[in-house]
């Protein structure tokens, strides 16, 4: 009689080896996906500590291979110590951006990479206040309006500190940081602010949707005096926002917010339905993965 010898370790060992191999393959594929996914991009900090002390803007700062060109309007800003006021606002350290005068001045920041997230820590001149100023950041892509966001310091008082930020998945390459409005009731304030710790999140080129694959044939009539018919065509169904802003990025009104199917669409803006003056405005059409902007001249 022959004895059958079963090699018990062979099959389980093979199964185990195959399982390990599959795990490594999955981990590899996941790492490749994460590497090319915009969501995986890490934020980059600009703390201005390597900027030359007492230097006025404009200047360039580089961090993690991203270069930011920082300029300003008016009398601008300069690089100063964080304790230039005789004290250091919470969270500030090293070198900071400090206003060169008591007059309002915007920060103009552009990047050599496309980014999806921006934030900057700020501290407005307010002394023992019960409320705080409104700060605004407006983002642009190749000079075209992308979106805007505001922030009011959560804890008002004396030189209150907070973070102004914006996130636009479609990407942008420049921002304007603007002192938007004074504290509503505070009497002891100035229209100036300190800034420090700017953070941006870069994206890979493949992480930005090609907006030509989503929308085409945007037609904006110019000039208009009574009503404007904005025409565009969608290559796929998308949740669409159609909004109007003034040239500072301040929201004027919403024209449409909803889902539209593939095909041609028209949105009407009744110029006389609302108290607006004549001038130059920005029309923005955005979806989940794209944004288009154009200028409208309103004659009154």
Image (cartoon, helix red, strand yellow):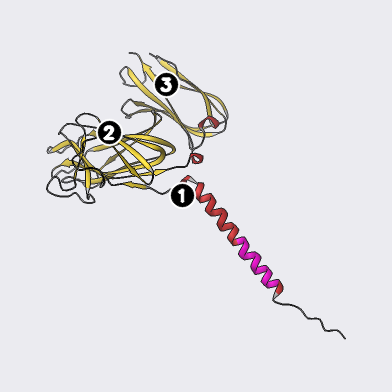
Which residue is rendered at x = 30% and y = 28% of the image?
248
- Could you tell me if the residues under marks 2 and 1 are in contact, i.e. CB atoms within 8 Å? no
Q: Nearer the viewer, residue 198 or 168?
A: 198
Kindly identify which residue carries mark 1: 40
Residue 19 magenta-highlighted: yes
* Residue 98 x %, y %: 19, 40
Q: Quadrant of residue 2?
A: bottom right
Which residue is rendered at x = 51% and y = 46% of the image?
36
Query: Is the N terminus in the top left, top right, bottom left or bottom right quadrant?
Result: bottom right
Quote the CA–CA distance across marks 1 and 3.
39 Å
Secondary structure at badge 1 equals helix
**Callout in the foreground (2, 1):** 2
Quote the CA–CA distance across marks 3 and 2.
36 Å
Secondary structure at badge 3 equals strand
Kindly identify which residue carries mark 2: 71
Dot 2 or dot 1, earlier in sequence: 1
Q: Nearer the viewer, residue 180 or 48?
A: 48
Q: Residue furthest bottom?
A: 1
Left or right: residue 213 versus residue 90 is: right
Specify the segment rendered in magenta.
Answer: 11-22
* Residue 188 x %, y %: 12, 38
Q: Nearer the viewer, residue 110 or 260?
A: 110
Residue 59 versus residue 22 in the image, above or below:
above
Q: Main secondary structure of the magenta part?
A: helix
Dot 3 or dot 2, earlier in sequence: 2
Which residue is rendered at x = 69% and y = 76% of the image?
9
Whether residue 90 can be seen here: yes
Q: Quadrant of residue 285?
A: top left
Residue 274 versus residue 47 in the image, above or below:
above
Residue 254 magenta-highlighted: no
Kindly identify which residue carries mark 3: 269
């Amino acid at each position: 009689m022959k004895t059958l010898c079963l090699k018990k370790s062979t099959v389980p060992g093979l199964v185990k080896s195959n399982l390990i191999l599959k795990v490594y393959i999955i981990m590899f594929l996941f790492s490749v996906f994460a590497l090319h996914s915009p969501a995986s991009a890490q934020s980059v900090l600009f703390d201005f500590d390597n900027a030359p002390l007492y230097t006025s803007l404009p200047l360039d700062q580089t961090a993690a291979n991203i270069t930011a060109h920082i300029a300003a309007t008016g009398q601008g800003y300069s690089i100063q110590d964080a304790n230039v006021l005789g004290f250091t606002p919470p969270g500030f350290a090293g070198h900071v951006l400090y206003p060169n005068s008591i007059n309002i001045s915007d920060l103009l920041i552009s990047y050599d990479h496309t980014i999806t997230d921006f934030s900057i820590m700020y501290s407005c001149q307010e002394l023992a206040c019960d409320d705080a100023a409104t700060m605004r950041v407006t983002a642009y892509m190749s000079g075209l309006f992308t979106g805007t966001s505001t922030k009011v310091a959560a804890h008002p008082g004396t030189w209150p500190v907070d973070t102004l930020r914006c996130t636009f998945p479609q990407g942008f390459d420049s921002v304007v940081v603007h002192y938007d409005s004074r504290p509503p009731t505070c009497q002891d304030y100035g229209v100036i602010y300190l800034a420090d710790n700017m953070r941006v999140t870069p994206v890979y080129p493949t992480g930005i949707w090609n907006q030509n694959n989503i929308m085409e044939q945007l037609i904006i009539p110019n000039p208009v005096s009574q009503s404007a018919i904005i025409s565009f065509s969608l290559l796929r169904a998308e949740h669409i926002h159609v909004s109007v802003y003034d040239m500072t990025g301040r929201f004027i009104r919403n024209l449409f917010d909803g889902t539209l199917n593939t095909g041609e669409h028209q949105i009407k803006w009744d110029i006389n339905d609302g108290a607006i003056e004549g001038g130059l405005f920005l029309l923005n059409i955005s979806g989940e993965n794209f944004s288009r902007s154009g200028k409208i001249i309103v004659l009154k």
